Image: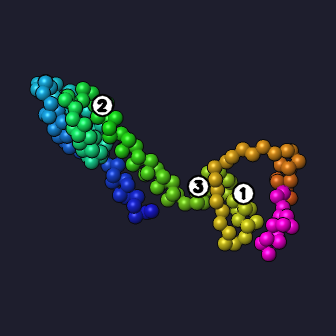
Amino acid sequence: MRIYLPMIQDALRPAAREAVATWVEFLMSRYRGRPDSPAFSLMDKQMWLAVIGHWPVDVLQAAVTQWCAEDRPFAPSVPGELKALGEPIYNARRSLNARAQELLRGPDQVARDYVSADDLATLRARLGRGSGIVIVPPVTIEMSDELAQRFRDGSWPQRTEDQEAVDG
């Protein structure tokens, strides 16, 4: 996983401002009726940069390609129209990055999110060396007060004779 993390992070690196401007100009040049004044162009580019400037260049390229492939007779009037095409790709990469970061934290760090270090040491001692511990997010289990007390003091659950016979 560690070898893939830099690739995942590179896939999230924002495009250079010039690349965003180039792709926006390309998209706008495909359609008629766009104002050509320098003031409009500067304002337009700044608006686009503010909305989609955080995207990697290939996400921007994919969104522009998708827009053009849908054979629309007009350019997007606002960056949000293009953002709707590229944001799912970008969000999937962000999720992948977050999951990779979580996995690289290691089981002990994830376990500490749910179980104190002392409780984790006690669990390891009870299970013995070589036993794996899988920590899952907390769940709520309804049980009687008597059963809850037996669970806390370690007298429940107990193996039944049937379980011992099957395990041999």
Q: Above or below — where is 30 with respect to 166?
A: above
Residue 160 on the magenta segment: yes
The residue at the point 84 percent across, 61 percent down is 158
The residue at the point 75 percent across, 45 percent down is 141
Residue 82 on the magenta segment: no
Disc nearest the viewer among 3 and 2: 2
Q: Count neighbours of disc 1 (C-alpha within 10 A) and say few if under 14, some if 14 to 19, many if 20 or more.
A: few
Q: Is residue 20 left or right of residue 55?
A: left
Identity, as a three-letter code, of the amino acid under mark 1: Asp
**Is any atom of residue 104 visible in this view?**
yes
Quarter of the image where one finds residue 35: top left
Disc nearest the viewer among 2 and 1: 2
Span shown in magenta: 156-168
The residue beneath circle 2 is: 81
Specify which label sits upstream in the sequence, 3 or 1.
3
The residue at the point 27 percent across, 27 percent down is 78
Q: Position of residue 86 (x, y in %)?
A: 32, 40
Q: Is residue 4 left or right of residue 135?
A: left
Identity, as a three-letter code, of the amino acid under mark 2: Glu
Q: Count neighbours of disc 2 (C-alpha within 10 A) and say few if under 14, some if 14 to 19, many if 20 or more.
A: few
Identity, as a three-letter code, of the amino acid under mark 3: Val
